[in-house]
Image: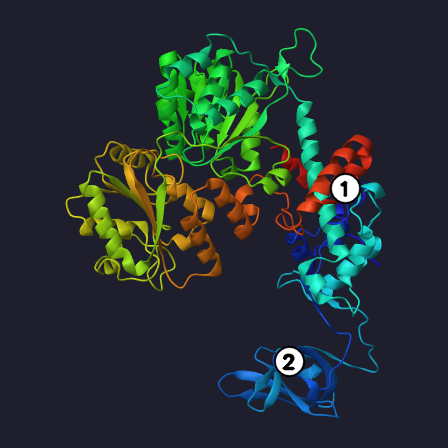
């Protein structure tokens, strides 16, 4: 019986105080950290692998490298003090042979359980030792009486150090007995051959002794197929629900007028749009002027646009954004463009000002570095509505930024923003229960399978061609030992009047034994260029290149520099005053210098494939023949080899994205979009396409004909996490 809570003295003569909550145990807190809050969470926490405790093997039948279970009596248990303290136990099964058990880490409880004369059941991997076969750190249990063997494979769950397997197994078994696993999906919508959800989970948690290990590992068993279908169905339902909910909301409806700002901007541009750019502009314009299906006479509202504009590096997304902004501003509404870095925001600002200010559009610039009077003036322009276009970083969504009439929000490199940040931008329009249209842009093309799952709630526009005149980029791989040859190539490029990027993965690195990074380590600066095999930092590399290229302007750019210093360095590089720019990945997106012809990426094996492609896209932005050099340190991991091989074989961003999905999984593309919502845990987007199609078809029918069951399915799998899809 639970102990009653103690009532404070000053409350005894009145109402009883609220009972004091019982403190949570360490395993309970560990389960919550794993996201195991509900019975259904435990039921869906499927085993990582299984152990076969259904049979015993004679010690004489053990084979080197094979995991097995034996039972015997402890003949000797002693602590040995040789190179290190260890517990040695000799086990005999009485009929065949003896086995040595070796424990390098042990407690007094081990000695007690493994005392001489105790009957013990042991499971582990047999290894050949100096004195015959042995097991190192096997699992064991003392046998008192006749302990029957397990009748099913023993599950081994994903866990943490503070959450023992035994505790987790009991928790899962208990949850399986309580949880409601009634069928939500009508039988006619299920793929053929699958079992019920209850049978699938019971089989996966406790597969029979004769279960096929191959089917367990490759997830081809009908139980796995049912679980993956259920997960994909919940994900599709949540996406379609989010899309339907947005269709009930209202946004300002824009009109396209002859001779309007959009047409004036098109006429003023010094280049012609590609056919792909024209197509996506028409798609966006149709969204912005589309009347609501239920609109009455005089209704000036529309369904909020929620569109993703994707296009390869250099495909011309910024001008499409400018044309969308011109439509909004012509209709008397404001447009906000938010970029993840100040360098990218500045790049957008310069381009947009050059295009729009001659048309009479006032712009505002908001970043974290803008302070004092300059910031106050910008805030006043935004609040009064004088600024038709507002460009900036996260500063755009700060509390003190008040828009007069925000009608269109544009988010560049949307995967680098969190859900809360996008929701905050959308909430900046608090007028007549309206919300702004949302256009998200990404230079990382979304593979088709990902578009069908994690982006199923979005309308997607794709710029699938590059502007004319772009020269293909040649990608070359060089081992770190060839650095001097790369420096020689830089000399040649600079001598021809061209410019070069050199990208490093770190700003600083700690000296051996230091606990914090240091700047400009004098000990390392004296070493000749290219001598050290370890990861080089941007500051050290800048110094080395300055020494190796006398008379050449070498600039330094990284995220910890002051905003004014970064802007000044970038301006010098754009103006051609600097020939070489040593930088971190702050130049990953947005930087546009047509004269840059060579990109060197230091320790390329440490970058993601999409990031490498983005960095490569900083060159080849004009008619100058361009090269991207990927410097790598051997030996390469399998993942590193796959990345560099893909970079060398193709410059197609869509193919790069497909390979990146294969290598890294969906998280690389989602970024923070699904923050708080679990990625697919069981289904594989490459292998389970038929299940995805079936889930998509079932989701559409369930939302129309079985709405309550659809809601139960989403809550079962996602709970409150489904709210994140609204961003």
In the rendered view of the protein, which quadrant contains the C terminus? top right
Looking at the image, is 336 positioned above or below residue 641? above
Please identify the quarter of the rendering in which residue 371 is found.
top left
Please identify the quarter of the rendering in which residue 238 is found.
top right
Mark 2 in CB contact with mark 1 (< 8 angstroms): no
Please identify the quarter of the rendering in which residue 706 is found.
top right
Q: Position of residue 354 (x, y in %)?
A: 35, 20
Q: Which mark is residue 713?
A: 1
Callout 1: 10 Å neighbours few (<14), some, many (20+)? many
Callout 2: 10 Å neighbours few (<14), some, many (20+)? few
The residue wearing badge 2 is: 108
- Which of the pair 193/410 is nearer the observer? 193
Counting the numbered discs, the total is 2
Residue 678 seen in the current view: yes
Q: Which mark is residue 680?
A: none
N-terminal-most mark, 2 or 1: 2
């Amino acid at each position: 019986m639970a102990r009653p809570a103690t009532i404070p003295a000053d409350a005894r003569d009145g109402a009883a105080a609220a009972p004091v909550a019982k403190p949570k145990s360490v395993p309970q807190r560990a389960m919550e950290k794993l996201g195991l809050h509900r019975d259904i969470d435990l039921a869906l926490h499927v085993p990582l692998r299984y152990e076969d405790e259904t049979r015993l093997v004679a010690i004489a039948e053990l084979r080197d490298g094979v995991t097995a279970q034996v039972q015997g009596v402890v003949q000797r248990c002693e602590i040995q003090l040789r190179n290190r303290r260890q517990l040695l136990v000799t086990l005999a099964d009485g009929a065949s042979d003896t086995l040595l058990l070796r424990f390098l880490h042990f407690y007094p409880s081990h000695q007690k359980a493994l005392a001489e004369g105790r009957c013990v059941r042991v499971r582990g991997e047999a290894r050949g030792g100096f004195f015959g076969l042995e097991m190192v750190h096997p699992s064991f249990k003392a046998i008192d009486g006749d302990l029957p063997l397990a009748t099913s494979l023993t599950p081994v769950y994903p866990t943490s150090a503070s959450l023992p397997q035994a505790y987790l197994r009991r928790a899962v078994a208990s949850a399986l007995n309580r949880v409601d696993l009634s069928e939500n999906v009508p039988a006619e919508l299920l793929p053929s051959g699958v079992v019920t959800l209850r049978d699938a989970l019971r089989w996966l948690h406790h597969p029979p002794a004769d279960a096929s290990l191959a089917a367990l590992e490759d997830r081809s068993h009908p139980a796995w197929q049912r679980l993956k279908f259920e997960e994909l169905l919940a994900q599709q339902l949540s996406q379609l629900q989010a899309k339907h909910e947005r269709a009930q909301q209202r946004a300002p409806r824009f009109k396209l007028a002859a001779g309007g700002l959009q047409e004036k901007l098109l006429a003023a541009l010094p280049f012609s749009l590609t056919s792909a750019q024209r197509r996506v502009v028409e798609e966006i314009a149709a969204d912005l002027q589309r009347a609501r299906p239920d609109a009455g006479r005089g209704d000036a509202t529309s369904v909020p646009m929620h569109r993703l504009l994707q296009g390869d590096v250099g495909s011309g997304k910024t001008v499409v954004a400018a044309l969308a902004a011109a439509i909004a501003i012509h209709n008397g509404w404001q447009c906000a463009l938010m970029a993840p870095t100040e360098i990218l925001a500045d790049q957008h600002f310069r381009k947009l000002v050059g295009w729009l200010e001659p048309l009479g559009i006032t712009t505002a610039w908001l970043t974290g570095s803008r302070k004092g009077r300059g910031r106050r003036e910008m805030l006043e322009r935004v609040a009064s509505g004088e600024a038709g276009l507002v460009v900036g970083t996260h500063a755009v969504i700060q509390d003190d930024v008040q828009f007069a009439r925000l009608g269109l929000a544009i988010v560049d490199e949307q995967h680098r923003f969190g859900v809360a940040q996008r929701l905050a931008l959308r909430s900046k329009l608090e007028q007549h229960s309206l919300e702004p249209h949302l256009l998200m842009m990404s230079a990382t093309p979304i593979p088709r399978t990902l578009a069908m799952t994690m982006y199923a709630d979005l309308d997607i526009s794709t710029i699938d061609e590059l502007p004319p005149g772009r020269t293909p980029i040649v990608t070359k791989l060089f081992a770190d030992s060839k650095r001097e040859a790369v420096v020689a190539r830089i000399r040649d490029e600079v001598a021809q009047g061209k410019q070069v990027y050199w990208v490093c993965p770190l700003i600083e690195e700690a000296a051996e034994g230091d606990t914090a990074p240091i700047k400009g380590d004098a000990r390392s600066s004296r070493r000749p260029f290219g001598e050290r095999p370890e990861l080089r930092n941007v500051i050290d590399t800048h110094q080395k290149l300055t020494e190796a290229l006398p008379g050449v302007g070498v600039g330094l750019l990284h995220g910890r520099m002051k905003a004014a210093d970064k802007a000044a360095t970038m301006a010098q590089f754009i103006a051609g005053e600097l020939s070489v720019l040593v930088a971190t990945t702050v130049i990953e997106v947005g930087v546009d210098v047509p004269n840059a012809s060579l990109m060197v990426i230091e320790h390329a094996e440490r970058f993601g494939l999409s990031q490498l492609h983005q960095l490569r896209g900083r060159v080849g932005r004009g008619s100058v023949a361009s090269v991207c050099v990927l410097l790598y340190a051997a030996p390469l991991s399998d993942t590193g080899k796959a990345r560099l091989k893909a970079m060398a074989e193709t410059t197609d961003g869509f193919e790069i994205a497909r390979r990146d999905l294969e290598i890294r999984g969906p998280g690389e593309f989602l970024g923070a979009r699904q923050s708080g919502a679990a990625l697919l845990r069981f289904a594989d987007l490459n292998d389970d396409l038929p299940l995805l199609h079936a889930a998509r078809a079932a989701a559409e029918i369930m939302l129309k004909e079985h709405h309550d069951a659809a809601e139960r399915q989403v809550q079962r799998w996602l709970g409150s996490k489904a709210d994140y899809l609204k961003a």
